[in-house]
Image: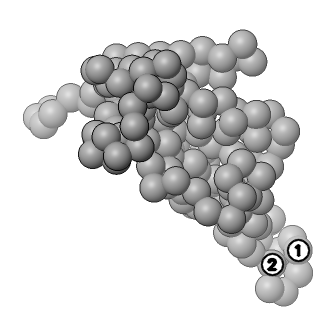
Amino acid sequence: MTGTPPTQPSHLVTHPDGVRYEADVLPGPVAGAAAASAVSPEVAAEVSRVGRILVGVDGSEASVRALATAVDLAHALYTTLQIVTTWRIVGESADMGGAGWSPESDAREILLEALGRQFGISFPDWVSSATLEGAAAQR
């Protein structure tokens, strides 16, 4: 097999709830909440965030807490944050919900509600979100 091997995160953080968060690379001089808060907004805007935290939301209270923790970690580690909700049609579930029902629309509503609860009407530019088809474990 040729090609580049997948990268392994160099930093793993486990929350007391048992949720594992990963960042590809630890940031240098701006690591930690104290350092990040000491940086002026003008300087922070010029410093690139390094690494990524990925968190999945499914509408449950546990996923909303995981999102809040991921936001705190992204602040502390000065990383970007990607928030994902997945959906899929399994077997006969395509007939559930009647005409006009869409699992993708349901997933999008779940994602938007979680974003609204966490950030209000707008979220920072270091946050991205997506609704993806497929099983969460495959993402």
Picture coordinates of residue 16 (x, y %)? 72, 13
Residue 58 is situated, as x and y percent measured from the top left of the image, at 74, 48
Question: Going by the image, does 18 lie left or right of 8?
Answer: right
104 up-or-down from 90: above or below = below
In this rendering, is residue 25 above or below 81? Answer: above
Residue 75, above or below 109: above
Secondary structure category for the residue under label 1: loop
Q: Residue at x 40, y 37 (%)?
A: 40
Q: Quadrant of the N terminus?
A: top left
Q: Which residue appears farthest toward the left when viewing the image?
A: 2
Residue type marked 1: Gly
The answer, for residue 28, to whether it is visible in the render is yes
Q: Position of residue 44 (x, y in %)?
A: 36, 40
Disc marking residue 97: 1
Q: Residue 68: where, in percent of width, then height?
A: 69, 36
Query: Would you say the residues marked 2 and 1 are in contact, meaning their CB atoms lie under 8 Å apart?
Result: yes
Task: Depth check: give the residue in front, 113 or 58.
Answer: 113
Q: Is residue 34 left or right of residue 72?
A: left
Task: Read off the residue under disc 2.
Answer: 101
Left/right of residue 64 with respect to residue 39 in the rendered view: right
Residue depicted at 13% across the width and 37% down the height: 3
Q: Which quadrant of the structure image shows residue 80?
A: top left
In the image, what residue type sits under mark 2?
Trp
Residue 69's disc is none
Residue at mark 2 to residue at mark 1: CA–CA distance = 5 Å
